[in-house]
Image (cartoon, grey):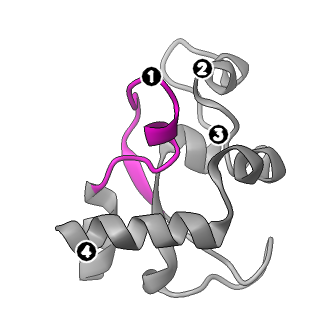
Amino acid sequence: MSSRSLRVKSLPCIACQQVPVDQCQATEEHHLCISSGQKRLGDEFSIPLCTHHHRGDPAAGVTASAMEALYGPSLARNPKAFRAQFGSDSLLLHRTNQELAKL
């Protein structure tokens, strides 16, 4: 695992930071792609997302639809709504790079 990967995983979820509730799941590293379903870009193009925002996984005892109502859409289940609410890939990458520069 690269140094950047470890640093990205140490950050809070970039989407959870925009909603008025605390992050309830672990942060994962999401690698951005050239376009939807295409080849991943390298580690230098990754952002921190919690399990819900990354894969759409519900928390223990909470349904996926309840998670979406509380935390907003997940990138895996509804990428268009996710980007509309939280920002484009380039914006989220820019914000991630700003946070990493502070470490």
Contact, mark 2 vs mark 1 (Cβ under 8 Å): yes
Front residue of 103/41: it is 103
Is there any visible trace of residue 96 in the rendered image?
yes
- Relative to 41, 2 lies left or right: left
Number of numbered labels in the structure image: 4
Instruction: Tell me the magenta residue range.
Output: 11-29
Q: Residue at 64% of width from left, 68% of height from top?
A: 89
Query: Magenta stretch containing residue 70, yes or no?
Result: no
Q: Which residue is label 2 attached to?
A: 70
Q: Which residue is label 3 attached to?
A: 56
Please state, as top left, top right, bottom left or bottom right, where the C terminus lies in the image. bottom left
Contact, mark 3 vs mark 2 (Cβ under 8 Å): no
The CA distance from mark 3 to mark 4 is 28 Å
Q: Residue at 40% of width from left, 28% of height from top?
A: 24
Q: Image height check: is 41 above or below 76?
A: below
Q: Residue at 43% of width from left, 40% of height from top?
A: 17
Q: Can you tell which mark lies on residue 21?
A: 1
**Residue 77 appears at what percent x and percent y?**
76, 44
Q: Which residue is label 4 attached to?
A: 101
Lower position in the chain sequence, tag 2 or tag 1: 1
Lower position in the chain sequence, tag 3 or tag 4: 3
Q: Image height check: is 41 above or below 95?
A: below
The CA distance from mark 1 to mark 3 is 17 Å
